[in-house]
């Protein structure tokens, strides 16, 4: 798969989850079957115009879909539902990990699972929170180079964490409740 395709998927996820209101909308739609922009506006305390904008963005990005239209006092109310892409179901979790040769659909599913985990923990609102994913094609020499680099990277992360713990202990500050989790696949 071309890096450009992966970037397009990552970009779509970042755009969808890059605003706290969109994260809140997805959380509501994950918990409820359907909701209209009016209902979301009332529930989340966000102006209807702003809500409409974020709902349109999520729909355009493919994270929600129009499920039903209802006639309301001379107007039509639109009801949306979250797409199965972010449902966190066992079927999605049981799928094999993506590989560069499996195509954009597999990569999109993997990114969606990671986004679902971020949604469950409150989204991407923390200052240092980020999600990175890089699929590469490696020959035997590249695999060997990566195998040598990853332990050095992990050791650097562990040194940074240990230094942070020491500084917190010296300052007699409690460890923050939010931890930075680092994963290597």
Image (cartoon, grey):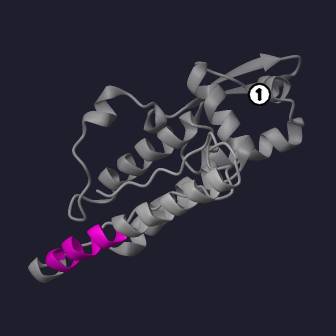
For the stretch drawn in magenta, the main secondary structure is helix
Q: Residue furthest front?
A: 170
Q: Position of residue 180 (x, y in %)?
A: 53, 51
Task: State the residue at coordinates (66%, 26%).
Answer: 28
Start-end of magenta stretch: 143-153
Please state, as top left, top right, bottom left or bottom right, where the C terminus lies in the image: bottom left
Residue 25 falls left or right of residue 159: right
Picture layout, residue 93 above or below residue 166 = above
Q: Is residue 23 visible?
A: yes
Q: Quadrant of the N terminus?
A: bottom left
Which residue is painted at 87% across and 30% down in the image?
A: 45
The residue at 59%/55% (across/down) is 129
> In this rendering, would 52 be left or right of 166?
right
Q: 125 or 15: nearer the eye?
A: 125
Tag 1, which secondary structure? helix
Q: Is residue 144 magenta?
A: yes
Q: Which residue is farthest left?
A: 140
Vertical position of residue 135 compared to residue 53: above or below = below
Quadrant housing residue 59: top right
Q: Looking at the picture, how far across and down is residue 171, in whole percent? A: 71, 54
Residue matched to label 1: 40
152 relative position to 126: left or right: left
């Amino acid at each position: 798969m071309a890096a450009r395709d992966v970037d397009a998927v990552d970009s779509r996820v970042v755009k969808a989850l890059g605003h706290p209101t969109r994260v809140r909308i997805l959380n509501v739609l994950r918990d409820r079957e359907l909701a209209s922009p009016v209902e979301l506006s009332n529930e989340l305390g966000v102006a209807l115009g702003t809500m409409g904008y974020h709902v349109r963005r999520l729909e355009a990005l493919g994270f929600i879909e129009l499920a039903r239209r209802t006639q309301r006092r001379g107007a039509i109310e639109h009801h949306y539902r979250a797409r199965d892409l972010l449902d966190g179901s066992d079927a999605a979790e049981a799928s094999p990990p993506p590989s560069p040769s499996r195509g954009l659909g597999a990569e999109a599913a993997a990114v969606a699972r990671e986004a679902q985990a971020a949604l469950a923990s409150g989204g991407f609102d923390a200052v240092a929170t980020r999600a990175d994913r890089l699929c590469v094609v490696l020959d035997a020499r590249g695999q060997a180079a990566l195998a040598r680099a990853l332990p050095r990277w992990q050791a650097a992360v562990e040194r940074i964490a240990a230094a942070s713990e020491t500084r917190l202990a010296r300052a007699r500050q409690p460890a923050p409740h939010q931890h930075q989790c680092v994963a290597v696949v």
